[in-house]
Image (cartoon, rainbow, N blue to C red):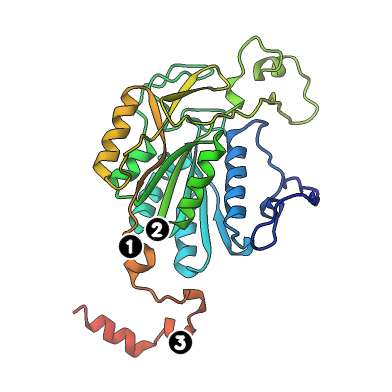
Amino acid sequence: MPSIVKPIASHPSLLRNQLGLTIRDYEGSMSTLCAGCGHDSITAAITRAFHELSTPPEMIANSAHGRMPAIATGAAAANRSLVFIGVSGDGDSLSIGIGHLAHAIRRNPKMLYVIENNGVYGLTKGQFSASADLGSKPKKGDPNRMQPIDPVLLALSLGATFVARSFSGDKEQLVPILKAGLAHKGMALVDVISPCVTFNDHEGSTKSYLHTRQNTMRVTEMDFVPPEQEILAQISAEGKTAVTMHDGSVVYFTSLPQGYDPTNRQGVYNYILERQGKGEIPTGLLYVNGDSAELHELNATPDEPLVSVPYEKLTPGAAALSKLMESFR
């Protein structure tokens, strides 16, 4: 089913960036996600980041959930002049697509890699994802008994050159992180905790899945998800911030302290483990290495985008191939 087309309307008071564009010029189709979904908050933050950076919309290349790193890496190899962003989920990046994530980190293409992390498979009825915390309880069934995969710790251990974490409801923190990631020379991985509104309905609710299905005569194939309010919170610069999710659970976020060194990989790793041991989720720019070699430096490609290199240079002919093969003998 195609997405709903947004009406073309722009208020005259909307701010214009250096290109003369408003934020509406960066928006896409209407969202088909549940009302209050944290993923929509992330989309709004991404839109705001591109608008504030005055990025030409036609120069933005994006790929979504489902083997996104392979598409983004190929596109980045072919045309380095574009600005690349990939949006994935914790289910995609940390389960069947974990190999793609790992090798994208190794190749280090210049791109922003956003993980929308809600701990469940939100499109297939809320099974636990690989990032679900130990002991997490589903709507039905047994609590999760498997250790979670933390994308931040995984990225640090694999040599990622930019690692950050934020909360979808704190745009004042998330937008600057996204802008920093877009400016990074290499792959910038941003893990965003994004609450799911769909799987917090409960037995006894007149608007729950169970009640609706037991008391509805189907005349068409439909479903119903009760709307929820978007969760918003600003992470305090001191101490920890408690954020209550839709299901009543409480998540504790902390900002990085004064004197924190984001260039010390081992120190960052140890700090995250320490805070997690206290039930807290550190947010902010966790690690960055500005001296890393990105994809094109690693492969010694020309400064000119490969899509612009003449065909004759890309395929120098049989004689050049024979000379190259001879060098391997």
Q: Is residue 70 at least partly visible in the picture?
A: no
Q: Disc 3 marks which residue?
A: 312
What residue would you read off at disc 2?
Answer: 186
Asked if the residue at tag 1 contacts the one at tag 2, i.e. Cβ–Cβ closer than 8 Å, the answer is yes
Residue at point 68%, 31% (across, down): 35
Q: State which tag comes first along the sequence, 3 or 1.
A: 1
Coordinates of residue 58 in the picture (x, y in percent): 63, 64
Identify the residue at the far left of this view. Answer: 329
- The quadrant in which residue 19 appears is bottom right
Q: Quadrant of the N terminus?
A: top right
Q: Which residue is mark 1?
A: 293
Q: Position of residue 285 (x, y in %)?
A: 40, 43
Circle 1: residue type: Ala
Q: What amino acid does circle 2 point to? A: Gly
> In the visual, does 75 lie left or right of 147?
right
Earlier sequence position, callout 2 versus callout 3 = 2
Residue at image location 63% in from the left, 60% down from the top: 57
Residue at far top of view: 204
Q: Quadrant of residue 268?
A: top left
Front in this rendered view, residue 150 or 174: 174
Instruction: Please name the residue shown 33% across and 22% down the image.
Output: 278
User: Which amino acid is tagged 3?
Assistant: Glu
Asked whether residue 173 is in view, the answer is yes
The percent coordinates of residue 270 (x first, y second) are 26, 35
